[in-house]
Amino acid sequence: MPIVLSDNERGEQHGEVCVTDRSEAPVASDVDAARLGDPAAFGRLLRIWDRDLRGVAWAVVRNQHAVDDVLQTAYEKAFRSIDGFTGASSMKTWLHSIVYRSAIDHVRYEGRRRHAGIETLEQVPAAGSTSVSATDHIAIVDALGSLDLETRAMVMLTGVAGLTFDEVAAITGVARGTVASRVSRARAKLRQEVQS
Amino acid sequence: MTDRPSDLPSPDDRRADDEIDQVLAASVPPAGQDFWDRVDTSLSAIAEERPPLDRPETAASSDTAGEVIRLTDMNQANQTLRSPLALRLAAASAAVVLTGGAIFLATRGGDDGGAEVATGDSSAQTTSELATTTIPAPGESTSTSVDELDSTTTTTAAPPTSECVAGCDVGLPISPITNEDALDTFQEDVGCYFRADEADLDGDGFDDAVFFSGDFGALMIVDGTTVTFEPVDGAESIGLWTVTDYTGDRYDVGFVDVGEEVETSIESTDRPATLQLRVDDGGTLDIPGTLGCGV
């Protein structure tokens, strides 16, 4: 079955929503080698997509240490089941679905274990690459943290990872229209933080 | 190109969205070298544990064989029967009674192999007005009359795989398993769930699965008790998360007649299969259904 490389996998940008550096595109031979169980090739692919994958995990679990745990678990799980990746979707989308599920599972399990209330999204200093003030930055991150975890992931998947609604629908198992409406409402809420 | 809702594209909104995305992207903590060191080490270890995947289909059925699959502490198992939905199991031949909110698969001993409608327990008998399905002995057809739904279906019972030796008149309710059950027991809910084809209330199969298997073993809720299973040595793999035979306290469970997998989404596949639940003191019940697995 032919390998499908998404626009992002080819290094192309998704218009105005692409804010991360995608100068490094995956090599098709790495995808082939990873599917045959080459850990080095799979590791190279992970390094290309890790920033986007990490964004989804971070938005959901809201803790840096937990992000590392979730991602490591998800990457191991993906590599164990790499032969189950058929190429019907892009590998990036496939990895996002695994990370998303792992992050959701983590939150649900930890939530029951700790009986914790709503946590605030961990504040991480901005990299200094944005024109947004520190106050607005905190407000935006806080506003993201006030959303439900699935919507947080959808915002990151569409806005930061640059995936389409169709791709996000496939990843989250939520209907495309529902994804669109939830992202729209979430963005409206986040914009209020910027514009207020 | 990323599609956007039609009510968003004003220039101000776009600028705001760009700023938001920049903030969110900048807020994501970067991976440290120690993270990649751990990932690289674990990926290499995984690669060394399995043969080369030059034939994905073959490798898919073998790469988990012999892997260490741990059972968690039974104390973690949830001992609560959560739902009135139940499968009532005994031994050689099967009968199914669908009731409003309760399902019983029942079997009985005897040489005639005929059908017998299970009496169920009192809670089921009080809610039996909705529908009644009877699955007769092997080879016989069964008719399903749904009183209020005005529909009739015919199925054939799966043949039993062993004679009823003991316990034939003792019913065992099998309860559905939720993601929470799997998480509570194994700290994971990504694996395989088995759903029975028959005895469904709405024509779409059980809403809840009756079997879960994952990295740590397998799980069923039998007679109100969470039963964990570990794979039998030499059992064949069915994909990544399931093997053909498991053993547990008082019960064994396995799969036969496993069909080809069908991809149902990016991260899940379905296989037709028949779940066999075997009671240590005698009796086997075959439950045709679907084994759905995540990645």
Image: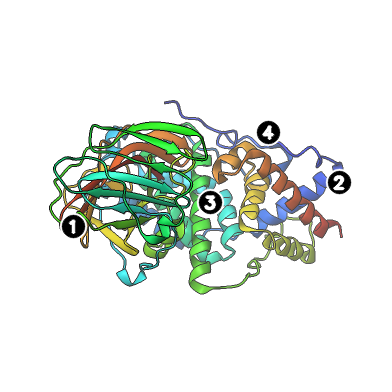
Q: Nearer the viewer, residue B293 or A41?
A: B293
Separation of marks 4 and 3 at Cα, in angstroms: 22 Å
Mark 4 Cα shell of 10 Å, populated few (<14), some (14-19), many (≥20): some
- The three-letter code of the residue at mark 1 reads Gly
User: Can marks 2 and 3 be said to lie on one chain?
Assistant: no
Whichever of callouts 4 and 2 sits on the residue coming sooner in the sequence is 4
Residue at horizontal 49 percent and vertical 41 percent from the top: B202
* Tag in front: 4 or 3: 3
User: For the residue marked with disc 3, what is the amino acid?
Assistant: Tyr
Residue A192's place in the image compared with A158, above or below, is: below
What residue is disc 2 on? B12
Image location of residue A99, percent across then percent down: 50, 51
Mark 2 Cα-neighbour bin, 10 Å: few <14, some 14–19, many ≥20: few
Q: Nearer the viewer, mark 1 or mark 3?
A: 1
Give the label, 1 or 4, closer to the camera.
Answer: 1
Residue B188 in sight in this render: no
**What residue is at 52 percent from the left and 40 percent from the top?**
B148
Helix, strand or loop status at disc 3: helix
* Chain under numbered label 4: B
Q: Secondary structure at mark 1?
A: loop
Under tag 2, what secondary structure? helix
**Disc on res. A100:** 3
* Nearer mark to the viewer, of 2 and 1: 1
Which mark is first along the chain, 1 or 2? 2
Image coordinates for residue B54, horizontal then vertical, percent: 29, 33
The residue at which mark 1 appears reads as: B167
